[in-house]
Image (spheres, rainbow, N blue to C red):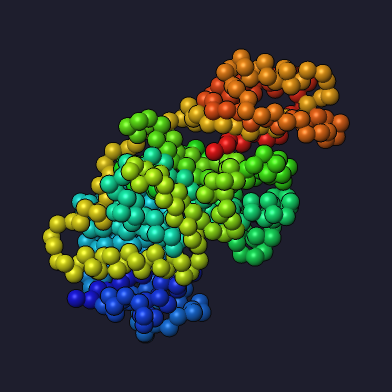
Amino acid sequence: MGIKLGILGLGTVGTGTVQLLQDSVGRHPLLNEIEIYRVGVRSLSKPRMVELPPGVVTTDLEAIVNDPEIDIIVEVMGGLEPARSLILTAIKNGKHVVTANKAAISRFGAEIFTAANQASVYVMLEASVGGGIPVIQPLKQSLSVNRIHAVTGIVNGTTNYILTRMQTEGSDFDDVLADAQRLGYAEADPTADVDGLDAADKIAILASLGFDGRINLQDVYCEGIRQVSKTDISYAAKLGFVIKLLAIAKGQTSDNSQLSVRVHPTLVPQTHPLASINGVYNAILVEGEPIGQVMFFGPGAGAGATASAVCSDILNLLANLKTNTPKSNPLLACRHQNYLQIAPISELVTRFYARFLTKDQPSVIGKLGTCFGKYGVSLESVVQTGFQAELAEIVVVTHDVQEGDFRQALAEIQTLEAIDSIPSILRVL
């Protein structure tokens, strides 16, 4: 039994997928049972890095998802529309879907998976998070008997590249971003990456799988790296930390009835497994019971890496179709029906790093301590580091505190006559 593919998109990931499918020597023999039947593109005149038989490539994407000959639709075009509509049409027509589209899944997952369950088809999304890193299927299958406590990841290669270079070179954010754009690591419009939106899409997907429920993307707290300065990276190093943009999903209660799901720059202890993940690489740390800690590490993007994930999903579907069973495989299908409750960021309990610029007056540290103490904020360390433009610089790291209490303390501190500004506030893992 062979299967016919309809591929939507022939950009970086689509090209990598076709190249992998055409080069089956030394790979799993099931690849030989896959036929690239139709490939949808925006323009027929654009030069391609792959050769396909005449008539395979078309600009009529609707015809592909409506073609009764096609078994599996591979959506690698990206974006929200027409990707969402094409996926839903394919599902309505009884076709299985493989997608690399984290934005469409994180925003329209409820609609897509409800339709897939009703049609008894599968939507596979290994390539949507972590590029070539196998993390989706392990969460759905290998780790499914565990009670997941937390999923913490570096899931955006662009921001990790920027922060790594700021750390190793002592460079400014704007300079490294410009260089990353020149080298192709960052888009001309880097908003989705540097403002944390891409990472938010991905942690919404991982949280849904890890904690067995649907996630409303609007409830995911999101903060990017634009405000991270080389000064903070330097202080973090002196205090035994590195700064990473982390995507975190963590149970807030013993029964995981309430979660914290968030993206923000974070001070990570240098001894932590994620502290050594540098450059464009991604890593996802899963903590659960009874497994303990498991970390998935590898290239988070790129044609070959993402094509590897896409084709693994295709093989999974083919293997399942060959068994010819009428019932859905519960380890491949989506079982999430209810939305998970996400706690507001004000209820988060964590440590904080804050940097203050103060006027050179006596008892400033004492006044800071008094204000913090008033709101139950206990200080782990206080460092007065010197002067900057005739202002004293004071860095504090707190013990665990509820974010709402910490913010109230800061609001009062800002009213003190001795405080010039608070340039940096970062959470600590």
* Residue 369 horizontal/vertical position (percent): 68, 19
Is residue 234 shown left or right of residue 132?
right
Which one is in front, 373 or 207? 373
Q: Quadrant of residue 323?
A: bottom left
Q: Nearer the viewer, residue 411 or 218?
A: 411
Quadrant of the rendered image containing residue 237: top right
Pick whichever, 327 or 53, lies toward us.
327
Q: Residue at x 26, y 62 (%)?
A: 96
> Residue at point 49% right, 61% down?
298
Residue at coordinates 38% horizontally, 65% vertically from top-left? 310
Q: Quadrant of the N terminus?
A: bottom left
Residue lying at 46% horizontally and 66% vertically, measured from the top left:
305
- In percent of width and height, residue 217 lies at 42, 42
* Screen quadrant of the C terminus: top right
- Residue 336: tell me if it is visible: yes
**14 or 383, which is in the foreground?**
383
Give the x, y percent position of residue 340: 34, 36
The percent coordinates of residue 177 (x first, y second) are 67, 55
Eyeballing the image, is 125 above or below 228?
A: below
Q: Is residue 113 visible?
A: no
Give the farthest residue toward the left.
326
Q: Is residue 193 left or right of residue 314?
A: right
Please, is residue 150 above or below residue 414 in the view?
Answer: below
